[in-house]
Amino acid sequence: MIIEIPKFHETFNPILKVLSDGKTIHTRELQKLVIEKYFYQLNEEQLAEKTKSGENLVNNRIAWGKSYLKKGGYIFYPERGNVKITDKGLKQKSELSLKNVVDDSGIVNFYAEENLKNNTKKNELKEIINSSPQDLIDTGFSQIEKEVKNDLLEKLKTIDPYYFEKVILILLKKMGYGEFIETSKSGDGGIDGIINEDKLGLDKIYIQAKRFNENKVREKDIRNFIGAMSGDTNKGVFVTTSLFDIGAIEKAKNAHHKIILLDGNKLVDLMHEFNVGIQIKATYEVKQLDQDFFEEQY
């Protein structure tokens, strides 16, 4: 059975149950026990998922659950890095909801939704309620990233085809490949550029770039590309702003050459990752309490 990664408020009750013996345990041990006892059905990929800031997502959700429970008076931190249940937490016998904890903590009155008449606004509010602050940050960044990639792909489809070829060569260089050579724009035999993997040019990668709007790259295009590759290399990268049809994918897969296919979506993913054709508009700092600073008083 596959389950979803728990929302932060779905960790409330598992946290209290793990702490129900009244013992003081370290936060890392708490996270480990909560996962082992209550979210053991998560697969390896889910357990390895990260937030936008690079933290482990499951542990981050548990940490936010712990934070809300502390504000609600259900747990406390007897010493740095450790957590223990309170008398209030021990007396809590029924299942805790987010509303219970928010009402007890006075964090924010999320529950003004009864005053909302618009169903869309209600759904948006429910999504906010079910998200930790870190989830909201990640969602916002993901939305911005998606919009930037869409804009980038649309731009690539409108630029000069020759400049598009140069963009691909610049990207590959940013990715750590060697110096590139732009081929002549006439009689290049279907090769738009050559990447030297080493400084002496002993290992070469041939590049083909097709700036398409709607048309898919077909098997014939891959066949022509392979035919244009000379005997001094068996490696090629075929890039397009559109998609590859099944015939093209099969042809590349079954070729004696090593042919890498990059469609429009993969292309903009790489351009976004290596900052090609985009710029950083703003950088935000997320701050947290410095426990070491306050330890100095002892």
Image (spheres, helix red, strand yellow):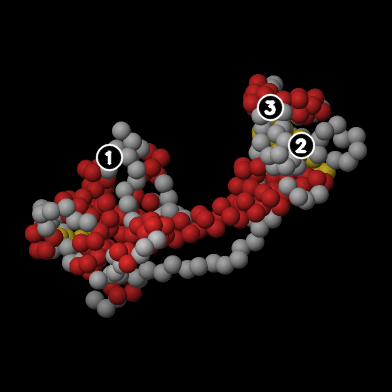
- Helix or strand or loop: what does disc 1 sit on? loop
User: Three-letter amino acid code at disc 2?
Assistant: Gln
User: Measured from the top left, where is residue 290 in percent x and y?
Assistant: 35, 71
Distance from disc 3 to disc 2, alpha carbons, whole Å, reads 14 Å
Residue at 65% from the left image edge and 61% from the top image edge: 279
- Locate residue 130 relative to residue 260 in the image: left or right: left
Say which quarter of the image contains residue 221: top right
Q: Which mark is residue 208?
A: 2
Q: Which mark is residue 248?
A: 3
- Label 3 CA crowd tier, 10 Å (few <14, some 14–19, many 20+): some
User: Three-letter amino acid code at disc 3?
Assistant: Ala
Distance from disc 2 to disc 1, alpha carbons, whole Å, reads 47 Å
- Locate residue 90 relative to residue 218 in the image: left or right: left
Viewport quadrant of the N terminus:
top left
Q: Nearer the viewer, residue 218 or 75?
A: 218
- Helix or strand or loop: what does disc 3 sit on? helix
Judge depth for marks 1 and 3 and give the one in front. Answer: 3
Residue at 27% from the left image edge and 45% from the top image edge: 35
User: Measured from the top left, where is residue 228 in percent x and y?
Assistant: 82, 28
Q: Nearer the viewer, residue 210 or 206?
A: 210
Do labels 3 and 2 touch, CB within 8 Å? Answer: no
User: Measured from the top left, where is residue 294 in percent x and y?
Assistant: 30, 75
- Label 1 CA crowd tier, 10 Å (few <14, some 14–19, many 20+): few
Say which quarter of the image contains residue 70: bottom left
Residue at 37% from the left image edge and 59% from the top image edge: 122
Q: Which mark is residue 2?
A: none
- Locate residue 291 relative to residue 269 in the image: left or right: left
